[in-house]
Amino acid sequence: MFIFNKRYFYLTIILFLIEVCIAVFVNDSFIRPFIGDALVVILIYCFIKAFWNIHSSLVALSVFAFSCTIEIFQYFNFVNNLKLQKYKILAVALGSVFDWKDIIAYAIGIVTVLWLENKT
C-alpha cells in the first residue's frame, strides 16, 4: 500500500548525501568499499519504506536479495557483457567487481536495519 513516510524519506535523503560524499571525497580501503556498501542497503530500505507500508522484515530480505543479485551480476561481468560501461552512472550503480566482502557488508547493513527497527 502506498504511503508517504517523512521520517524514512528524510533518512533516504541524508543517506544519499552521505553516499555521495563517500563516493566523491573518500578513497580508502574501508569506508568507501565497506561502510558505503552497508549504508547503501540501508538507503534502499529507507527509500522503499518512505513510499510503501510493507513489513520491515520483507523489505529487509528483499533489499538483501536484490543487493546479492547485483553482486552476482558483477561476478558474471554483467555490465561489460551487455556493453553498458558507456553509461557511467549505470555502470557505477551496478558495479563491476565481485567481492564476497560486499555481501558481508550488505548483511551487516540489513542486520543493522532490523535491529534498529526492533528497538523502536
Image (spheres, rainbow, N blue to C red):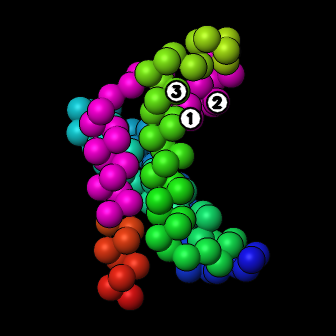
Residue 27 lies, in percent from the top left, at: 32, 32
Q: Nearer the viewer, residue 108 or 10?
A: 108
Query: Residue at image x 36%, y 82%?
Result: 118
| Amino acid at dot 3 | Phe
Element type where label 1 sits in the image? helix
Query: Residue at image x 52%, y 27%?
Result: 73
| Amino acid at dot 1 | Ala
Label 3: which residue?
73
Extent of the magenta region: 85-111
Residue 36 in the image: above or below residue 9: above
Query: Residue at image x 53%, y 46%?
Result: 66
Q: Residues within 10 Å of mark 2 (few under 14, many from 20)?
A: few
Residue 39 in the image: above or below residue 13: above
Give the side of residue 42 with respect to residue 102, left or right. Answer: right
| Amino acid at dot 2 | Leu
Element type where label 2 sits in the image? helix
CB under 8 Å between discs 1 and 2:
yes
Residue 88 lies, in percent from the top left, at: 63, 24
Instruction: Considering the whole magenta stretch, tell me its main secondary structure.
Output: helix
Q: Earlier in the sequence, mark 3 or mark 2?
A: 3
Residue 28 lies, in percent from the top left, at: 26, 33
Label 2: which residue?
90
Give the side of residue 110 with respect to residue 44, left or right. Answer: left
Residue 103 lies, in percent from the top left, at: 34, 41
Task: Return the mark for residue 93.
Answer: 1
